[in-house]
Image (cartoon, grey):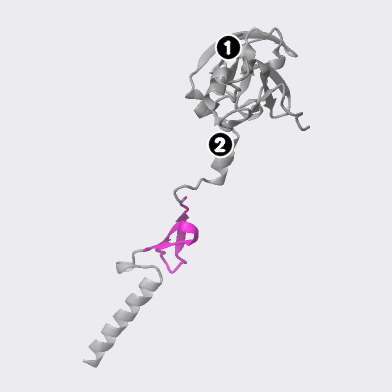
Amino acid sequence: MVTGLRSSVAIVLLTIALVAGGYGPAGTPTPTRAAGGASATVGSASGGSTPTVSASATVAPGQTATANAVSQAGDAVTITGLVQHSGPLTVEQATQLGSESVEVQFQSSKGSEQHRYTGVRLWSVLQHVGLRLDANRKNDQLRKYVVVTAKDRYEVLIGLGEIDPNFGARPILLAWEEDGARLSGDRGPFRLVVPGDVRGGRYVTGVVRIEVRDIDSPPRRP
């Protein structure tokens, strides 16, 4: 009788020890919750070796991994100035505004270049964010211009009268693809494409900023 009681107590104590050590019935591992919302599993070991632990991190809803956030930031152009909705525009968002392809030829420091670009018209981008126009001023859009800035701080100017469909109607593109390949690295995420220009000075690569200004805007800071 005493012997049977001692055996029962020993079995109970052994079960408690296994559960506390991360093992369920029959020595199977039980999942435990690691810090920071990650889940960890304690694996069973053989031959008396130390149990192995594997963990997989999870990102809570509404959170974004840092590396992914950096990648997305590098794929956007910032639109600012005299617009109703300033902020970043990604390539994915730009593709939703419509796209067209053009074949162009221009002179550069490398000689004559010929390429095929796919992108969205700059005018469509500005219509998407909304231009801030003075309804009491005649043809206020003709007093405005766009400063396009590259990653290396190279800048060019485009007058709104050049791209307004009611005036110059030039099909200047904000392109994300050149000769069938996505623009990336120092040359991406966008390139300004100016069909009709003899020289490529306004074919800005690595466009990261578009600012809308007018002739009354205060001087820009260096």
Residue found at x 70% / y 13%? 200
Q: Is residue 187 left or right of residue 100?
A: right
Does any portion of residue 194 appear in the rendered image?
no
Quarter where residue 117 is shown: top right
Q: Position of residue 95 (x, y in %)?
A: 49, 24
Which quadrant does the N terminus fall into?
bottom left
| Circle 2 crowding by C-alpha within 10 Å: few under 14, some 14–19, many from 20 | few
Mark 1 or 2 closer to N-term? 2
- 53 in relation to 208, above or below: below
- CA distance separating discs 1 and 2: 27 Å
For disc 1, the neighbor class at 10 Å (few under 14, some 14 to 19, many from 20) is many
- Which of the two residues, 25 or 40, is positioned nearer the viewer here? 40
Taking 53 as reference, is 201 left or right? right
Camera-nearest label, 1 or 2: 1
Q: Quick check: 11 left or right of 96? A: left
Picture disc at residue 171: 1
Which residue is depicted at the point 47% across and 24% down? 96
Q: Is residue 135 visible?
A: yes
How far across and down, in percent of the image, does residue 139 sit? 62, 14
In the image, 56 versus 103, the foreground residue is 103
Over which residues does the magenta segment extend? 30-59
What is the tally of numbered marks visible in this picture? 2
Type of the residue with mark 2: Gln
Quarter of the image where one finds residue 14: bottom left
Residue 148 point in image, percent of width and height: 67, 23
Amino acid carrying label 1: it is Pro
Residue 143: say if magenta.
no
